[in-house]
Amino acid sequence: MSLELMLALGVGLCAACGVYLVLRARSFDLILGLTLLSYAVNLFIFATGRLAVNRPPILAPDTEATLAQYADPLPQALVLTAIVISFGMTALLVAIALAARRAGDDDHVDAGRQEPQ
Amino acid sequence: MSHWPIAPILLPLFAAVLLLALERWRAAWQLPVNLLATAALLVVCIGLLGRAADGGVTAYLLGNWQAPFGIVLAVDRLAALMLTLTAVLALASLLAAMPRWHRRGAHFHPLFQMQVMGLNGAFLTADLFNLFVFFEVLLIASYGLLLHGGGRRRLHASLHYVTLNLVGSALFLLAVSLLYGVTGTLNMADLAVKVAQAPDADVGLLHAAGLLLLVVFGLKAAVLPLGLWLPTTYSAASAPVAALFAIMTKVGVYAIVRVFTLIFVGERLAVAAPLLLPLGLATLALASLGALSAGSVPRLAGYLTMASAGTLLAAVGLSGDRALAAALYYLPQTTLAVAALFLLAELIARQRGDPGGALVAGPAVRQPALLGGTFLLAGATLAGLPPLSGFVGKLLILRGAVGQVGGFAVWAALLLSGFAFLIAFSRAGSRLFWKVSPAQEGPRHGALAMIPVFGLLAGGLLLAVLAAPVLRFAQAGAQQLLAPTDYVDAVLGARPVSRGGGRP
């Protein structure tokens, strides 16, 4: 199996599980689902730099400085940003979900729903 | 290279850090410092607006990197307009928070400035990934502000709001990386060039990226299938926060305008443009029904926020610079009026006591003439009654729709929705001010509480009185957007400052 196919299947599987869990509408499943979704997205961003083996994005003195010789460093930087942001967001969501569960005594996301006024 | 374009980002950032430090030492200084920073921001933004009105696009190279390798900030007429609007709104909602809200709960002041920083950054940046980052900054701050004041309703509203926006962020990242994978750039001006040259084999991927961006920005702008979160969320927020949030749907509209007039243009790539008009009209129709069925004043204001986003989207979806200019005129006045309604809703609710803002028979307000008159003015502006600014805005959109594809539908939707809002406001007003039992002991609102509401409504009146110059600015702004060469040239042509420290 080629590297590309494996990566694509991995992204697809993560995204599918993530969407399923998010739609379960329980706060714990929701957090897991969003985490899986962000994994899928991070892998996807990483793949936009194209997959390459043995080509670190660090200039070597005896190699020509073109993208054919090196991996694209930008998607890796973007992934780092995305990971940091999604990590922080997950922490916040956990805090909110915990507080909501304590207030509503149920971990369904609509548990605290009141009649709209 | 002038450094003013980055001031609307740095000023709130430093203010937020200072406010965070003051929280421990001198909590009493927070409010004056915040007020000072917001007022200074307004002055800076008006200065940028004056410069943008002269015509040119100002590009600012962050870190002195030549575009497209570094991040570029760009100020054109649209960006300067949005910056000024944000600063006005921030000042008004801070003044509204002054009597009591700012002391209810921790970190209000730093979060407030961070929110303003995220908004300003989103309007300034000319880099798609940077736009994502500033979206996150403004969202993180808005999660905190939404929770401000505590309570179960806010907690549950924010659980939904955070989840929706996290899924939105995931889609945004997918779209951005798809664009990067195809074109190898993230700079919007460079994207505009590269996308036009992309081979036909890549057009499908570009379409997918464009539509994903439409979904993400549509979620922010509360467009129909994705906008149902808005009334619940905004009516749960405290009044000054909801007033500041009135600009957040406009961030979505701004991003739609920016991306779909700059990058996805031309026969081959215009995937989203034909969808904007029907989506906008459907949003407007649903918001009209929602306004008719709203059970409280904050919810009514929430549906009107949705309606203004729908109207704007429909106007943007019409082809032609007249409709786009009308949208640019309509945008500031509707934002100010909606924010005023959110603030007014709280003032009314506090004097009614138990029923609060709910549209049921209850105690009379203690200052019926003052609050009723202001409510009438806000309602008339939002429903679009002459001679107020809402009327001028709608008239301009109707004129822009003449002879365009879908123009008839815009006429019908705009006029019918205006009628629906009129009914909704009459119903709300008669419940609040006429069907009443004797007033209870409650607070009387002094000048301090009324200033922000009056200020926002006076801003709307000013836009009606000065309609001619504002419209000239809007027309020039629309032309600038529809001929993006200026923007592309300014961003890609900006030269780094030489090492000698000289200022070219």
Image (cartoon, coloured by chain):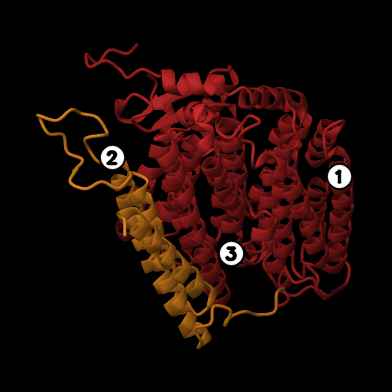
Figure quadrant of residue A60? top left
Task: Tell me the crowding category of disc 3: few under 14, some 14 to 19, or many 20 or more residues within 10 angstroms, Cα based.
Answer: many
Under mark 3, the amino acid is Ala
Under mark 2, the amino acid is Asp
In the displayed orientation, state which residue is furthest to the left.
A61
Q: Mark 1 lies on which chain?
A: B
The quadrant of the image that shows the C terminus of chain B is top left
The quadrant of the image that shows the N terminus of chain B is top left
Indicate the position of residue B464 as horizontal and vertical percent values.
78, 33
Q: Which chain carries label 2?
A: A
- Residue B317's place in the image compared with A20, above or below, is above
Earlier sequence position, callout 3 versus callout 1 = 3
Tell me the residue that label 3 is attached to. Answer: B237
Look at chain B in the picture and name its colour. red
Residue drawn at (81%, 55%), measured in percent from left and top?
A: B285
Tell me the residue that label 1 is attached to. Answer: B409
